[in-house]
Amino acid sequence: MAYYPMFHIKILIMTNLLYYVALILILFWALGFFVYNIGALIHILLLLAVVSILLRIINGKNVMK
């Protein structure tokens, strides 16, 4: 049985490529799942950001010193 090193390298590259594609698909699935489910959390974080900006303005602290 002959050994073809280039064939072996191609198999390794394709195996790695399949792992990368699977990883990217899983990451996109998780991103879509969690972004859809944490919509209310984003609104709470935006509210906290606005409140912190308003408190900074009300207290009169100058960040640009």
Image: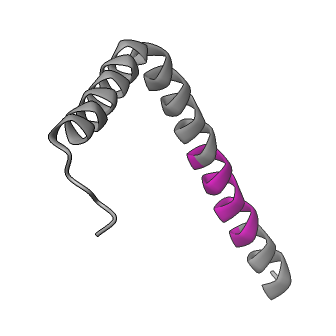
> x and y percent of residue 49 in the render?
32, 33
**In the figure, residue 5 lies in which quadrant?**
bottom right
The correct choice, above or below, for 57 with respect to 4 in the image is: above
Q: Is residue 24 left or right of residue 54?
A: right
Query: On screen, 26 above or below 11?
Result: above
Say above or below: 31 vs 16. above
Question: How many labels, in total?
Answer: 0
Q: Residue at x 30, y 37 (%)?
A: 53
Residue 59 position in % (x across, y down): 15, 40
Q: Is residue 44 visible?
A: yes
Rendering coords of residue 25 (x, y %): 62, 38
Q: Which residues are magenta?
A: 12-23
Q: Is residue 35 left or right of residue 3?
A: left
Residue at 20% from the left image edge and 45% from the top image edge? 60
Quarter-of-image position of residue 26: top right
**Residue 8 position (above or below residue 44):** below
Q: Is residue 40 left or right of residue 36?
A: left
Does the magenta portion include 10?
no
Residue 35 in the image: x percent, y percent? 48, 24
Query: Residue drawn 49% across and 16% down?
Result: 36
Residue 18 within the segment the image draws in magenta: yes
Nearer-the-camera pick, 10 or 39 = 39
Q: How is the image coloured?
A: one colour
- Nearer to me, 42 or 5: 42
Residue 3 in sight here: no
Residue in view at x 37 percent, y 26 percent: 46
Quarter placement of the N terminus: bottom right
Most common SS among magenta residues:
helix
Q: Quadrant of the C terminus?
A: bottom left
Q: Residue furthest left?
A: 59
Q: Nearer the viewer, residue 13 or 33?
A: 33
